[in-house]
Each structure stands twice: as structure tokens, then as C-alpha cells.
Image (spheres, grey):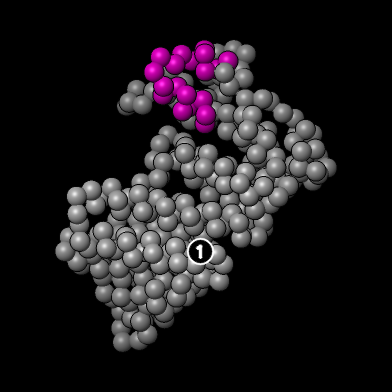
Amino acid sequence: MMASRVDLLSQVLTLIRLRGELIFSADLTAPWALQFEPGSAYFHVVSEGEVEVTASDGKRVRAEAGDLIVLPQGRGHAIGVGGGKPVSAREVLEAQVRDERLAIRLGGNGALTRLVIGAFRFEGDNMPTMLAVLPSLIHIPHSMRTEDTGWLEGLSYFLLAEAQEPHPGAALMISRLIDVLVIRAMRVWVRTAPPENKGWLGALADVRISRALKTIHDEPFRQRTVAELAGIAGMSRSSFADRFATLIGAAPLHYQTRWRLLLANEMLKGPDKRVGEVARRVGYDSDAAFSRAFKAQFGYPPALAKQGDRG
């Protein structure tokens, strides 16, 4: 079952292509606070000390040495210790980070918090839809990494080494290492997070709901009923529909349709792909019905789906 969940995670991440942007270290002494504006997504590796992280939706966690926090939605967040006055992270980065010194310092005379901070983005036309089903904040405590405990420290070390002593191909290497770190964090989260965590990753941690999700993803163009999906999950129709909507944030058939349209959007980018051909492939009997559903999902008709045609 875990392999199936990881496969589903891979399918989602394929549609929201991840690109690493920046890596730097931070030595922060209490009291201090940094405000990250909406835009890039971030991760924070706590090398020393502790930090309080507040996501855009108000979710708050306290992390300590060895912990990893990922904020994948790029909606802005705040970090700090000791009630310091918030300072713009962008302004601090502009003032202190240089090619030869990818590091910042901030704070008073209190306890030291040392972080490795990375910025990344998700790209692609499907990004807004898929980001909406990712959690606002992923917290991986050190205690949660019960196996291969050195992977986070190893990745952090190599990220900073590539950033501080750039060699040919360093930018691509940093981007790929950030990819690995973020994907590994999501995989750990799927395996260890309680099912009560809302969002796509939380749903993968629910054994019954993840069975239904796997069915939808394995045969995305086969239209199934709620009763069929409930039977696959081993639940009553009403219990399944309620649980699915609570975790995923969409009713089962709505999610099924959305997933088909996301795949259709990718298909239309291929060479010589006609709208009618894709409509039939994803299960629509008429071009008109497909076009209406597609435009409702993405805000533009399928004829304009090819990259560069919507400008």
C-alpha cells in the first residue's frame, strides 16, 4: 500500500513541476522574527536551537534542532523566537546575501537559532489547482525520521556546499537537491502524518481513502460512481463521501473530474493533439461538453491550452 501512495504522490508532483531557487544559512539570536512574503515556497532545516513557524492560514508549530519545516503553498509565512519585531526576509536577503556569502545574521543577544533555508517554486498550468490540496505547513520532527536519519543533514550539507563554492552546473545541482529534499519530506509526511491532517498528503495517510484515490488515478478516464469508490474503500456510501470531502476538500466525483481535466491539460500540450481526440480520450462524448468543463476548471478553452497560446 505504501508503494501505491508514493506512486500517487509522484503523479501529483509530475503535474506541479518543482524548481529550486535559493539556499542560504541563517544565524539568528533571540529575540528575532522574519516575515516571508507570498511568492516562493520555502523549507527550513533547524540545525541548532528552536524556531516558531506560522503559516499563512494561522497554523503554528515550534521546531527544534533536527526538525524540517516545509511550506509548499508559497502564500507567505513568519518565523521567529522571543517575540522580536518582524523584519522583511526579502529586505534582509537583499542587504546581506552575496554570491560569496550566502548567509544572514539577525537578532539580539539571546539564544542562537541556526537554520538552513531554501526557496523553491512549483510551475505549470496545473499549479494553482494542485497546490490547493497540499498542506499549508509540513513539520517533520527529528523523531519522525526513524530510518535513514542522516538524509536531511546530508542534503543540507551538500546544498550549502554547492551554494558557497559554485562549480559548473551548480545552479542545476542546487535545484535538483532541493527537489530531492522537498519530495523526501512529502514522502515522510505521507508515511507518518495522522490521517486527520487535511489535504492531499493527509488523505494518502488514510488507508481507505487512499485506496479510492489509487483507483481514480490508476484508471483516470473510467467514470466511477460514489458507490463504486465507497466499495473499494470498504466504507458506506455516506461515510466515504463525507470522509473523502473532509480530507481532499472536494467531493469524490468532483475530484475525479478535476483529475481527468488536469491530465487532459497536459495532453493538449503534446504535438498534434486535437481537442476532439483528447476529449474522447478522457471520457467526454462531445467536444462541447469537454470544452465547457475544461474552461470551468482552467478559465480558458482547450483550444488555447497549448503553452504560449493564451498570452
Q: Is residue 8 left or right of residue 196?
A: left
Q: Which quadrant of the structure image shows residue 118?
A: bottom left
Name which residue lies at 67% across and 47% down. Answer: 1
| Residues packed near mark 1 inside 10 Å, few (<14), some (14 to 19) or many (20 plus) | few
Q: Is residue 39 visible?
A: no
Residues 32 and 307: in front is 307
The x and y percentages for residue 310 are 36, 25
The x and y percentages for residue 86 are 35, 71
Q: Which quadrant of the structure image shows residue 217?
A: top right
Name which residue lies at 47% across and 75% down. Answer: 64
Q: Is residue 306 visible?
A: yes
Q: Residue tagged by mark 1?
A: 148
Residues 176 and 101: in front is 176
User: SS for tag 1?
Assistant: loop
The outermost residue toward the right is 236
Against 303, is 44 above or below?
A: below
Residues 127 and 214: in front is 214
Name which residue lies at 67% across and 56% down. Answer: 195
Against 252, is 293 above or below?
A: above
The x and y percentages for residue 76 are 41, 57
The chief SS type of the magenta part is helix
Q: Is residue 142 left or right of residue 5?
A: left
Q: Which residues are magenta?
A: 262-280
Please identify the quadrant where the C terminus is shown: top left
- Amino acid, disc 1: Asp
Q: Is residue 231 left or right of residue 303?
A: right
- The stretch drawn in magenta includes residue 267: yes
Name which residue lies at 35% across and 86% down. Answer: 110
Against 86, is 21 above or below?
A: above
The x and y percentages for residue 80 are 40, 73
